[in-house]
Amino acid sequence: MLDQAHMTSLFENATEGIILTKGDGIIVMINPAAEKMFNYTSDELVGRSIDILIPDQYKPHHHQLREGFNKHPSNRSMGSGRDLNGRKKDGSNMPVEVSLSHYRRDDELFVIAFIVNITQRKKIEQSMLEQKAELEKITDKIRQLNAELEIKVEERTLILKEALQKLEESQQELSEALDKERQLNEIKSRFVSMASHEFRTPLTTVLSSASLISKYNGANDQEKREKHIDRIRNSVNNLNEVLEDFLSLGKLNEGRVTTKIEEVNVNEAVGETIEDMKPLLKKGQHFMLQTETGCMANTDKKLLHNILVNLLSNATKFSEENKPIIISTKSEKDRIIIAVADEGIGISVNDQEHLFASFFRAANAGNIQGTGLGLHIVKRYVDILGGEVQLQSELNKGTTIQFTIPCN
């Protein structure tokens, strides 16, 4: 009796709709969740064909599907279920997810259908598609502006500011939608956070150079203007590349990130990245570069740049004013070793083992802006290049992150 009571309670209080039918589709039992879902009472459905809950356009073929299932019955879990539509009492359709189970009793087949109303999920997915389309429009606009950059620098600066504002607004809207369906949209949430993390540096470079250009209005300032125009052009090109990665983030999760292997002077690449990152330095902070000669490697320059951007950004962010940030390179056998050391807040021993996980932030970093993706991105990029990452840190004394890349 106790077991029967538990089974009855489970059936009556389940949040999923449950419908039990015979092999011929006649409804035997329906739980309260399914009654509420379809707006029928149990008395209205028991003894009738399951076709009453099938939309009209699918009814002609439903009996064939049922007969096929009866010949070869198999359990279909919810995770591998199908998106279908159910017909409510008022004749309206609603999207549902259905999984099937079966058993035999007295040599008669019974089928159990577990039903979930996924109307809200579909709304969220539609919202995501609309947001993605909006981001694609912004991407196209940025590409178009890049072609006109040399003749419309001041106009371009204004439009880029507007584009940045739209991107921030889109990110906020997208984050709010994801909060409502976090478990179903975890990948999309990573999508938005990574974009925010990657956009900051090139856009900062664009805005700072554009601001300086307006000050160089003398006849003898052409060289300075050209220098900043080049910085804007390079940063916008990099932003376009990041946008492409942003819109196809699945490549990284599936291990399909493309690489362009070429001979790279690592010292020059590090120096160029340092110049790009100088606008992010706090008052009194400065970069110190310590290099060895002969640091040449066949690698992907873009991925190397992205790794350094993340490490230098973290070093400036987690260090106080008037603190040095030391970048060193050296060649050792068949690999190049690059290290970034700061004298910042440091990381506790307990937090260090989790630091390369996505979205993880150290306990003492709560008041400092960040997504918790920086080192996770670094680790994945270094893995793609065939290298390794090591971290040494002590609270209130600083952090050193060292990574290697193969020479070939």
Image: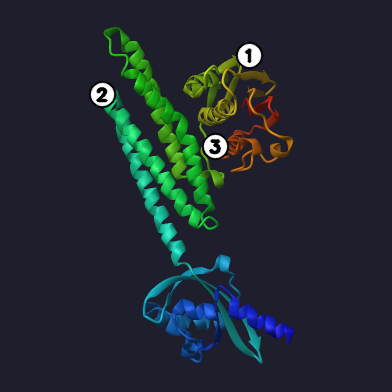
Q: Position of residue 209 (x, y in %)?
A: 38, 21
Q: In the rendered view, does 211 fall on the left or right side of 335?
A: left
Nearer-the-camera pick, 17 or 251: 17
Residue 238 x, y percent position in the rendering: 43, 30
Residue 288 in view, yes or no: yes
Residue 292 is labelled as 1
| Mark 3 or mark 2, whichever is nearer to me | 3
- Image x and y of residue 61, in percent: 42, 80
- In the rendering, which numbered label is found on residue 248? none
Q: Secondary structure at mark 3?
A: loop
Task: Name the image quarter holding the N terminus.
Answer: bottom right
* Residue hosting label 2: 151
- Inspect the image, locate mark 2, and give the three-letter code of the amino acid beneath it: Ile
Quarter the C terminus occupies: top right
First in sequence: mark 1 or mark 3? 1
Mark 3: which amino acid?
A: Gly
| Labels 1, 2: front one | 2
For disc 1, the neighbor class at 10 Å (few under 14, some 14 to 19, many from 20) is few
Judge the density around disc 3: few (<14), some (14-19), many (≥20) Cα neighbours within 10 Å.
some
Whether residue 249 is visible here, answered yes or no, is no
Q: Which three-letter amino acid code belongs to the residue tagged 1?
A: Glu
Q: Nearer the viewer, residue 96 or 158?
A: 158
User: Which residue is found at the position 47% from the left and 29% from the top?
Assistant: 201
Residue under pointer 3:
370
For this orientation, the residue located farthest to the top is 220
Badges 1 and 2: C-beta atoms under 8 Å apart?
no
Q: Is residue 174 above or below residue 297?
A: below
* Percent of width and height locating residue 116: 51, 71
Mark closer to the chain start, 1 or 2: 2
Of the numbered discs 3 and 2, the one sitting upstream in the chain is 2
Colouring: rainbow
